[in-house]
Amino acid sequence: MTHYINEVTEEQLKEILSKITDCVKRAIVAGVDVIEVYGDRLVGSLCSKIINKRTDEYGGSFENRIKFALQVVEAIKAASQEITIDYKLPIVTKQPDGTLLGKGGLELAEAIKLAKILEEHGVHMIHVAQANHTGNINDTIPAMGTNKYCFMLDECKAIKNAVSIPISTVGRIVDYKMAEKLINDGVYDIVGLGRPLLADPDIIKKLENKQEQLIRQCIMCNKGCTDDIQNRKFISCVLNPENGYEYKRFITKPSKIHKVAIVGGGIAGLEAARVCAIKGHDVTVYEKSSRLYGQLNIASVPPRKEEMNRSKLYYERILKHYNIKVLLNTKFNKSLAINYDDIIVAVGATNAHPKIKGIENSVDSWDVLDNKVEPYGKIVVCGGGLVGVETTEYLINRGYEVTIVEMLNEIAKEESKTILPTILNSFKSHNVIILTSHK
């Protein structure tokens, strides 16, 4: 489908302002304390000198472009002089290479001017954020390794120095410690957490109960949240199985305590152990290898993916807190099974090897990522799915020349459209040869 926009008429803008006033009145009746002006989208587009091409009183000069934004603030105040007004201020940011990112907002110099005017017009708080309309939601909600932590830091400092009202921000603020330090350093007054609260909605409760070690940290993979927002799907979290199912999935106490064996010490097995331990069961995890965490040990190796290791640290703390017994280098068998009331099998997957003549001379991608083997020379990666693509990224960052052979008509078919551009740009800069529709 081709995306298009219509230029909103002055009459439609007046109608929108009237509806905003009515909406605020209903919000007050509902007990709402704060209204945020979403300064992106329509408001941000009108403010933008990149998008706004109007020739009437809403276009052209800075004063004209911010006119509707100020009218929105006045429409809120027309409904109530008491309601707290927060304004999301989208900023078109300058990238390291000098290019601009974002269209529906203001460049920093104009954003500072608008922030001062908003304070004069009675706005109580300003929320600093990356301007959108970039074509990729990953630019505003970056996945692991695709942008630095707290990437709106400099813009936030500039806005805070310009006004006296509280400032908030978001953007790869991964945990409460980072948020607390930024507040103490005077960068901003309020922190906005999005994805971390999907991974663990009880962060504040756990802090209040001095259970910091039980906080599940977001790994910013974007798999269940941002990707599905982009695809208009159900929002979930790969680390939090209760997310989105709060009325259906919850941990209850059992009528009887059982002895439970978990076969497999990967993430699935450890999560099963965590739930069983919370329920009060006596839990033992059996792992046939010398280490826990299963495929996470190799999944965290490719470029940008080291942030997945936060899950390792989380389960390390969980095992200790709940006194879950772990037996490494132990293969589960029939003689062990008779000692347990319940057995949960979480042995994970294995990778397939196609029946190709000469396959015995190849090396396995899992072994490459696990540093068990070291390929050399010019390398062909057979299979352009996620594992093949990530192995390729790992190899090209080590200086190898790589060709990908993929049977389908595209590589990384399972990868999200938010992350795929980063991967393809990396491949292009390293001259990766991609042979799709090939065997």
Image: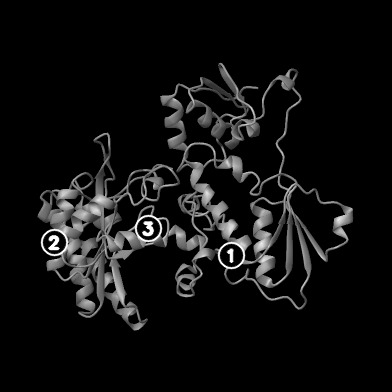
User: To which residue does mark 1 refer?
Assistant: 242
The image position of residue 3, as x and y in percent, is 37, 44
Which quarter of the figure is the C terminus placed in? top right
Q: Earlier in the sequence, mark 3 or mark 1?
A: 3
| Left or right of 203 in this view: 55 | left
Q: Could you tell me which secondary element the residue under label 2 belongs to?
A: helix
For the residue marked with disc 3, what is the amino acid?
Met
Element carrying mark 3: helix
**Residue 398 bears which disc, if any?**
none
Mark 1 to mark 2 CA distance (whole Å):
42 Å
On screen, residue 404 versus residue 281, left or right, reads left
Front label number (3 vs 1): 3
Q: Amino acid at mark 1?
A: Glu
Residue highlighted by disc 3: 178
Q: Are marks 3 and 1 in contact (CB under 8 Å)?
A: no
| Quarter of the picture holding the N terminus | top left
The amino acid pointed to by label 2 is: Lys
Looking at the rendered structure, the number of numbered marks drawn on it comes to 3
For the question of whether residue 163 can be seen, the reply is yes
Q: For mark 2, what is the residue? A: 116
Residue at left 49%, top 61%?
Answer: 198
Please say if 407 is above or below 13: above
Quadrant for residue 244, please give it: bottom right
Q: Is residue 10 visible?
A: no
Relative vertical location of residue 7 with respect to residue 204 in this rendering, above or below: above
Residue at mark 2 to residue at mark 3: CA–CA distance: 27 Å
